[in-house]
Amino acid sequence: SAAAHHPNVAKMAYNAQAIFALCSWPFSLKLLWAPIVDAVFSKRFGRRKSWLVPVQAAAGLVMITGSDYVEQQLGLGELEKLSSTPEVVKKAADAVISKMAESTTFDVKGVTAFFFLLYFLMATQDIALDGWALTMLSKRNRGRGPVCNSIGQNLGYFLSFVGFLALNDAESSENLWRPLLRLKSNPGVGLVSLGGFIKSMGVFMIVMTTFVALFKREDAYVAATSASSSSNGNEAYDALLTPERTKRKKNRKEEDDEDAELDAAQIGLAETYHRLYAVCKLPSVQWLFLVLLTYRLPTALSDNVKFLKAVEFGLSKQTTALLSPTLILPLGIIVPIAAAKIWHGSPLQQFMTAYKFRVTLVPILDVLMLLAVRSFHSSSDASSRSLFWAAVIASTGLQTIVNSLQFNAQMTFFAHRVDPAIGGSYMTLLNTAANLGGTWPSSFVMYLVGQLTVPPDCTLDETSGMEVCIGGRDAYFPLQLTFCVLGCLWIYIMRERVQHIAELPDDAWRTHLDDDDDDEADGTAMDAEHANGTVEMENGKGGLNFWKKKDDKTE
């Protein structure tokens, strides 16, 4: 691309990306308003739909109204107004990029603010969806939720990323889509622009939100404070059941009671925040926070900079688009399913196994891929092309596998440890820490690469008419080595702590605030019995211990 050869584009791109990465911060801050989403709702419309429907509708409207602004700020609309001659388009692209690189007319802060608003709405939607997922699945099926999550995200990524690139590519549009749809020929112009794609996705979101609002019924929530009353009136029916069916029904009821969700509207916002604060004080949660907030730093270059650097070296967007349906999407679907069978019941073991590859072998393959892209991307030699594709496929494939393994392990661990009594707020708390662990390294590493990269000095050779560049410094490769060593140190320091977290019982993840209330009620009843000389109660360090009295002797 033209951008790859402008002397100031590399530094500008990383500095702009460091600012633009801030737009994803709402997913790292959503805990601040998660209790509000849990506590304020319409019982008639549905606890989760009360937020899901208006927030998704608002996001759709934002996408529709702001699509033209985004395209204008990125300078993409100007190219569509030009002649379709390839030479003219290339010169126009160079002019637009030079203008962006050498002036301050590109409003990166405005574009960041637009997507920040969009991310804020989607983070709010995610809070409601997290809580809905917890109560939608029974405890025995909750481990399948992360698999559905992972597959759904990969399908969404495929449709939005690859779908846009396929419809935006001028060559594919001219040779495939326009003849297929019987549209008029328009060489050099894609079928869909970025602004048009954002607008169409906004319309699609509103349509799907309307469908959910009208046809998707939300089961009435079961408050934990009244879960015990749900069995009243069923004694006669229970008596007709066989012992086996009675046992199964009892097990299901106990499971439902355990998963019953507290009525956040009844306990109030202050109590909801108090419960979250109690969760944050749990030693198990604090150690998990430390893991989630640090493990993504050593992988930040591979996660955020690798493909930017590959495009800078000449990797085309057609090649990137080809990787998604042929490699990324299939692996994103197959890996979670296979992982559930291989590491069943040991999500953090799966997490650490994948991380060892992620901080050692993945960086090596990333470096080899970038060197291959820089050397062979324009080569027509068969052996060179083979090396190019082998490096690209190996790097992309392994990174997809380890990323999917860690994400699936993380979500599975959350689903099995979260206390459903706090609704979606507990899950949101853990997801917030996980999102923050990926957000701050992204901005940090973008800024670091931008500051340490020195663009070359380029001059035009009047004899050959070609641009000659000398000097400069590429910060990616030394930084990748540094982060690789940092990742190995992280494993050495934290592996025993991760194993300890994995071995903690479910009780270590509960606040027991409700248990304290129950103990007080039980204590009042036991005091009444103690007055009659039948039972003595001692409140010891380990909890409530009971001794039955008989003839002044304790058994």
Image (cartoon, rainbow, N blue to C red):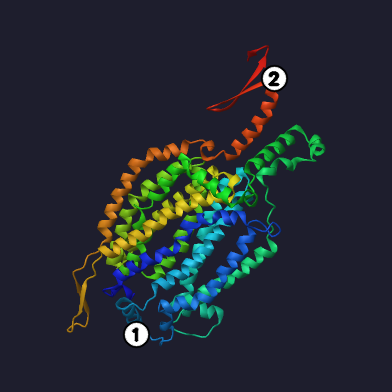
The outermost residue toward the front is 531
The answer to whether residue 302 is visible is: yes
Query: Which quarter of the rendering shows the C terminus?
Result: top right
On residue 430, which mark appears? none
Give the residue displayed 50% in from the left and 75% down from the top.
Answer: 66
Give the residue displayed 80% in from the left and 34% down from the top.
Answer: 239
Please identify the quarter of the rendering in which residue 461 is found.
bottom left
Where is 191 relative to 243, above or below? below
Task: Please name the amino acid that badge 2 sits on.
Answer: Thr
Report helix, strand or loop for mark 2.
Answer: loop
The reply, left or right, for residue 508 in relation to residue 2 is: right
Choose between 499 and 92: the one closer to the eye. 499
Residue neighbourhood size for the residue with mark 2, other residues' Cα within 10 Å, grouped as few (<14), some (14–19), many (≥20): few
Query: Which quarter of the rendering shows the N terminus?
Result: bottom left
Where is 24 relative to 470, above or below? above
The answer to whether residue 176 is visible is: no
Q: Position of residue 186 (x, y in %)?
A: 47, 85
Q: Position of residue 288 (x, y in %)?
A: 44, 44
Q: Position of residue 536 (x, y in %)?
A: 64, 21
Give the residue displayed 44% in from the left and 65% down from the top.
Answer: 23
Choose between 514 and 135: the one closer to the eye. 514
Give the residue displayed 71% in from the left and 34% down from the top.
Answer: 247
In front: mark 1 or mark 2? 2
Task: Please name the amino acid that badge 1 sits on.
Answer: Glu
Residue neighbourhood size for the residue with mark 1, other residues' Cα within 10 Å, grouped as few (<14), some (14–19), many (≥20): few
Where is 157 relative to 280, above or below? below
Residue identified by numbered label 2: 534
Choose between 471 and 224: the one closer to the eye. 224
Residue identified by numbered label 1: 87
